[in-house]
C-alpha cells in the first residue's frame, strides 16, 4: 500500500483522539457519581470532612476504573480482528491498523486493569474484549495481550505477571496465531507464551519460562527454561 506511510502518520494523530475518547467518556458517569455522593457527605468537623472527601475521591477512582474497563472492552469487542486460526497479513494493511488501535486501547487500560486482577471483573474484561475463558479459571495477570487470540479452558491457572502474545512481525508481515490453554493446564508466574502455542490438558509451564512460537506442550508434561524444554512428564511422576 503506497499510501500506508501517510495513513500511519495520520493514524498517529487519530490515536491521540482515540485516547481522549477512551479516557474521557468514562469520566462522565464518574463526575455524576462524585457530585451525587459529595452532596451526601457533609461534616462540620474539619478532619471528618477531609476524611469524607478523601473516601469520595477514592471511590470515584474505583467507579472511573470500572467504567473505563467496560468502555475499553466494548471498543475492543467492536474493533478486534476475528481470527480462528493462524493468518498472515501485510504489515501495511487496514487489518494492521485495526489491530494497532485495539492494542493501544488495551495498553491505555492496563494500568487500571492491574488493580482488579484476579477477579470476576478482569475475567469479564478479557471475555468482552474477545478472549474465551472457561469456568473455574484463575487469571492472575493483566498481560493477556491480543485477548481475541486467546482461549483458556476450564480449571486453568495463569500465574502473576505471565505474558501472552498472540501476534508477531516477520518479514514485513503481521502474523496472528491463537494461543490455547486446555483444561487443567497451568502457566506459571512470569512466563511468556508466544503466538500459536498450545498447552495441552494438565500440562505445566514453569515460572519465568519462555515458550517459543507455534510450540505444543503435550498433556501432563512440565516445561521450563529459556526457551522452555521438557522437565518431566506424567509417566515420570507416577
Image: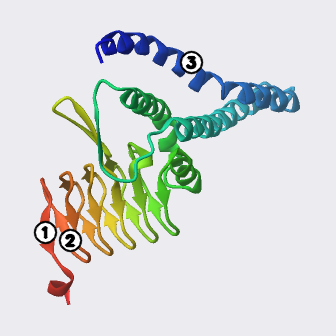
Q: Is mark 2 on a helix, strand or loop?
A: strand
Question: For residue 101, what is the image quadrant?
Answer: top left
Question: For residue 45, what is the image quadrant?
Answer: top right
Q: Is mark 1 on a helix, strand or loop?
A: strand
Q: How far is mark 3 from mark 1, CA to CA?
A: 47 Å
Above or below, 203 against 181 in this view is below
Above or below, 157 against 45 in this view is below
The C terminus lies in quadrant: bottom left
Q: Say which residue label 1 marks.
A: 230
Colouring rule applied to residues: rainbow
Task: Residue 222: give its label.
Answer: 2
Earlier in the chain: of badge 3 and badge 1, it is: 3
Q: Nearer the viewer, residue 132 or 238?
A: 132
Say few, some or many: other residues with alpha carbon within 10 Å of mark 1 (under 14 / 14 to 19 / 20 or more). some
Q: Label 1 near label 2: C-beta < 8 Å? A: yes
Q: Where is residue 108 in the image (x, y as percent from the top left)?
A: 47, 29
Q: What element carries label 3?
A: helix
> Who's the residue at 46% across and 70% down the image?
154
Q: Left or right: where does residue 33 sit relative to residue 177?
A: right
Q: How far is mark 2 from mark 1, CA to CA?
A: 6 Å
Q: Say which residue label 3 marks.
A: 20
Amino acid at each position: 500500500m503506497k499510501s500506508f506511510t501517510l495513513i500511519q502518520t495520520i493514524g498517529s494523530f487519530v490515536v491521540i483522539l482515540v485516547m481522549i475518547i477512551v479516557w474521557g467518556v468514562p469520566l462522565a458517569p464518574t463526575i455524576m457519581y462524585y457530585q451525587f455522593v459529595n452532596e451526601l457527605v457533609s461534616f462540620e468537623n474539619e478532619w471528618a470532612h477531609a476524611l469524607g472527601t478523601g473516601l469520595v475521591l477514592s471511590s470515584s477512582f474505583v467507579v472511573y476504573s470500572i467504567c473505563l474497563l467496560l468502555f475499553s472492552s466494548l471498543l475492543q469487542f467492536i474493533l478486534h480482528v476475528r481470527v480462528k486460526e493462524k493468518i498472515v497479513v501485510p504489515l501495511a494493511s487496514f487489518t494492521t491498523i485495526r489491530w494497532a488501535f485495539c492494542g493501544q486501547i488495551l495498553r491505555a487500560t492496563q494500568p487500571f486493569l492491574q488493580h482488579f486482577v484476579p477477579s470476576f471483573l478482569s475475567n469479564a474484561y478479557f471475555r468482552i474484549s474477545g478472549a474465551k475463558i472457561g469456568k473455574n479459571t484463575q487469571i492472575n495477570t493483566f498481560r493477556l495481550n491480543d485477548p481475541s487470540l486467546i482461549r483458556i479452558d476450564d480449571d486453568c491457572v495463569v500465574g502473576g505477571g505471565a505474558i501472552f502474545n498472540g501476534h508477531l512481525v516477520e518479514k514485513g508481515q503481521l502474523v496472528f496465531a491463537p494461543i490455547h490453554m486446555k483444561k487443567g493446564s497451568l502457566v506459571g508466574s512470569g512466563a511468556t507464551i508466544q503466538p500459536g502455542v498450545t498447552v495441552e490438558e494438565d500440562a505445566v509451564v514453569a515460572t519465568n519460562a519462555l515458550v517459543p512460537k507455534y510450540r505444543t506442550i503435550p498433556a501432563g508434561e512440565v516445561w521450563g527454561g529459556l526457551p522452555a524444554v521438557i522437565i518431566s512428564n506424567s509417566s515420570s511422576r507416577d
